[in-house]
């Protein structure tokens, strides 16, 4: 409630109540999560060992389609995880050419989280249990983008060792109502 005006000793009494909804949408119970360049498990039971065997295979596609089934555009969280050392991870919406690139070096196991949600915009480097503000490491052409309703083709990259980068996109479907 932002404001509540009730005049005293005025009959019949009327009141005006002003409210602010920071997010005036309904959401799904669960968030949507999609990993780009994920590992596909190949190990199954029953198991028989006949020579060389793969337990999993890493997908190498750097472009993925993210379908936003919401009735409105949504603001995702992007998480970069370094499988091996890399520099300057980025993600681009191929539909709009909007790009988020952060000028940081990541050692194996470190993460970089970009939160694009309204009122929660942050860029955080995560090394073990230590979190560091990396907002000042944005590239000059950095643009917080959203996932538009329908298809959104995203491409991830890094200046060095993009093969060592795993990218996860998390979002909540939003629905207008009332």
Image (cartoon, rainbow, N blue to C red):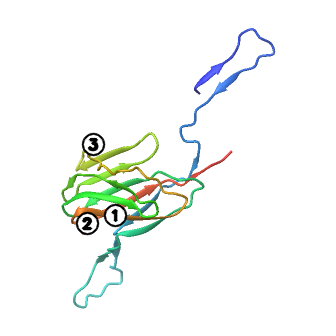
Q: Are marks 1 and 2 in contact (CB under 8 Å)?
A: yes
Q: Are marks 2 and 3 in contact (CB under 8 Å)?
A: no
**Residue at image coords 71%, 10%:** 8
Where residue 78 sits: x, y (%)? Answer: 37, 55
Q: Marks 2 and 3, how far apart in space? A: 22 Å
Where residue 86 sits: x, y (%)? Answer: 20, 60
**Circle 3: is it few (<14), some (14-19), or many (20+) Cα within 10 Å?**
few
**Circle 2: is it few (<14), some (14-19), or many (20+) Cα within 10 Å?**
many
**Residue at image coords 30%, 76%:** 56
Residue of label 1: 156
User: Would residue 83 be found to the left or right of residue 42 on screen?
Assistant: left
Residue 40 against residue 147 in the figure, above or below: below
Which secondary structure, mark 1?
strand
User: Would residue 137 be found to the left or right of residue 17 on screen?
Assistant: left
**Residue at image coords 66%, 25%:** 17
Where residue 36 sits: x, y (%)? Answer: 37, 66
Q: Earlier in the sequence, mark 2 or mark 3?
A: 3
Residue of label 2: 162
Residue of label 3: 136
Q: Quadrant of the C terminus?
A: top right
């Amino acid at each position: 409630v932002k404001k509540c005006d009730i005049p005293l000793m005025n009959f019949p009494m009327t009141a005006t109540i002003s409210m602010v909804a920071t997010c005036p949408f309904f959401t799904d119970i669960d968030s949507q999560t999609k990993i780009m360049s994920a590992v596909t498990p190949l190990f199954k039971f029953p198991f028989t060992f006949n020579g060389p065997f793969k337990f999993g295979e890493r997908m190498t596609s750097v472009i993925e389609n993210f379908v936003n089934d919401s009735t409105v555009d949504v603001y995702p969280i992007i998480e970069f995880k370094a499988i091996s050392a890399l520099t300057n991870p980025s993600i681009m919406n191929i539909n709009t050419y909007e790009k988020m690139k952060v000028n940081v070096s990541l050692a194996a196991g470190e993460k970089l989280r970009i939160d694009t949600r309204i009122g929660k915009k942050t860029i955080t480097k995560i090394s073990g249990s230590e979190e560091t503000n990396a907002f000042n490491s944005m590239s000059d052409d950095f643009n917080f983008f959203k996932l538009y309703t329908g298809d959104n083709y995203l491409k991830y990259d890094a200046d060095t060792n993009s093969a060592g980068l795993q990218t996860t996109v998390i979002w909540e479907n939003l629905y207008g109502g009332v």
